[in-house]
């Protein structure tokens, strides 16, 4: 069992920079480390949870690796169009941050940042500035066409680390309000991607350990522009080997 921790170090060595979206290359490296661990230390138990609950440590298990993805950030609301030729509209509300995924009271995957709301449209035909995306969420956009429409940014993509389902995706931003005689509101930014985290825990057979799946942040709402969409929930994966199996 002592060698298992050394093998796990290959996973721990893969780090995710703070406030940065996770790259496809990191997914590939992570998958390679997990496959190598399974090949050398089979059988390895893998459990994936997508809703919060309690995990009971099996007999013979003293270490567990928790891989978590936080909830995605909510998309920003679109801004209000210009109120009059001389009065700018109100900005859209910012989406809320996604919530962290936790195991035994500790973070294993931080939530994504909520998307910024679009600025309100100015007087005349000048559009409001779109919300700027972060953590993989797209910025709002403005289309200089006859209708003066704006569009919300796309939400950050989720992660396919555990299966064919994406977890921790950001919500899409809302479009800005339009009017025929004043500038349209800026589109809201898309919500950011939930963060990937990896942590090792010492556990005791028979004990119960709570885990919490990070929920997605709420989309910005309450103004004249289109509401932002909510981010999607995260997930957690537990990996462990029983001493009796080695």
Image (cartoon, rainbow, N blue to C red):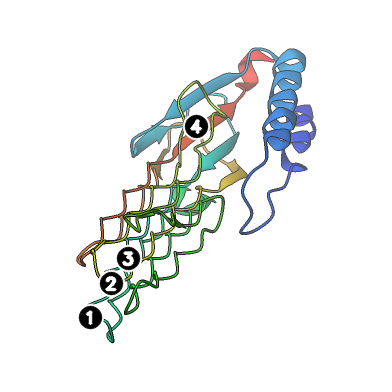
Q: Residues within 10 Å of mark 2 (few under 14, many from 20)?
A: many
Tell me the crowding category of disc 4: few under 14, some 14 to 19, or many 20 or more residues within 10 angstroms, Cα based: some
Q: Give the image quarter of residue 242.
A: top right
In 3D space, how far apart are the residues under numbered discs 3 and 1 (Cα atoms)?
11 Å
Q: Are marks 3 and 4 in contact (CB under 8 Å)?
A: no
**How far apart, in angstroms, are the residues tagged by discs 4 and 2?**
66 Å
Q: Which residue was labeled with disc 2? A: 182
- Please name the residue that numbered disc 1 is placed on: 84
Q: Give coordinates of residue 1: x percent, y percent.
A: 72, 26
First along the sequence among labels 3 and 1:
1
- Residue 28 vs residue 136, the one in the foreground: 136
* Left or right of residue 172: residue 136: right
Percent x, y of residue 72: 43, 48
- Looking at the rendered structure, the secondary structure element under dot 3 is loop
Disc on res. 184: 3
Quick one: label 2 or label 1, which is nearer the N terminus?
1
Q: Residue at x 51, y 51 (%)?
A: 137
Judge whether residue 103 can be spotted in this image.
no
Give the quarter of the figure containing the C terminus: top right
Mark 2 in CB contact with mark 1 (< 8 angstroms): yes
Residue, x 39% and y 69% (percent of image)?
127
């Amino acid at each position: 069992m002592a060698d298992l921790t050394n093998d796990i170090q290959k996973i721990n060595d893969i780090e995710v920079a703070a406030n940065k979206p996770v790259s496809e290359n990191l997914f590939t490296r992570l998958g390679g480390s997990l496959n190598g661990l399974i090949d050398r230390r089979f059988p390895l138990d893998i459990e994936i949870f997508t809703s919060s609950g309690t995990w009971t440590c099996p007999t013979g298990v003293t270490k567990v690796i928790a891989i978590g993805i936080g909830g995605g950030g909510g998309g920003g609301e679109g801004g209000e169009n210009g109120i009059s030729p001389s009065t700018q509209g109100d900005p859209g509300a910012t989406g809320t941050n996604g919530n962290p995924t936790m195991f035994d009271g500790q973070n294993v995957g931080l939530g994504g940042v909520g998307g910024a709301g679009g600025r309100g449209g100015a007087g005349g035909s000048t559009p409001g500035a779109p919300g700027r995306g972060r953590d993989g969420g797209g910025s709002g956009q403005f289309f200089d066409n006859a209708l003066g429409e704006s569009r919300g940014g796309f939400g950050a993509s989720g992660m396919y680390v555990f299966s064919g389902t994406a977890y921790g995706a950001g919500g899409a931003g809302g479009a800005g309000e339009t009017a025929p005689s004043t500038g349209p509101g800026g589109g809201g930014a898309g919500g950011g991607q939930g963060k990937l985290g990896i942590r090792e825990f010492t556990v005791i057979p028979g004990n119960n350990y709570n885990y919490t799946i990070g929920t997605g942040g709420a989309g910005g709402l309450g103004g004249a522009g289109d509401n932002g969409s909510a981010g999607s929930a995260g997930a957690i994966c537990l990996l462990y080997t029983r001493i009796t199996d080695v």
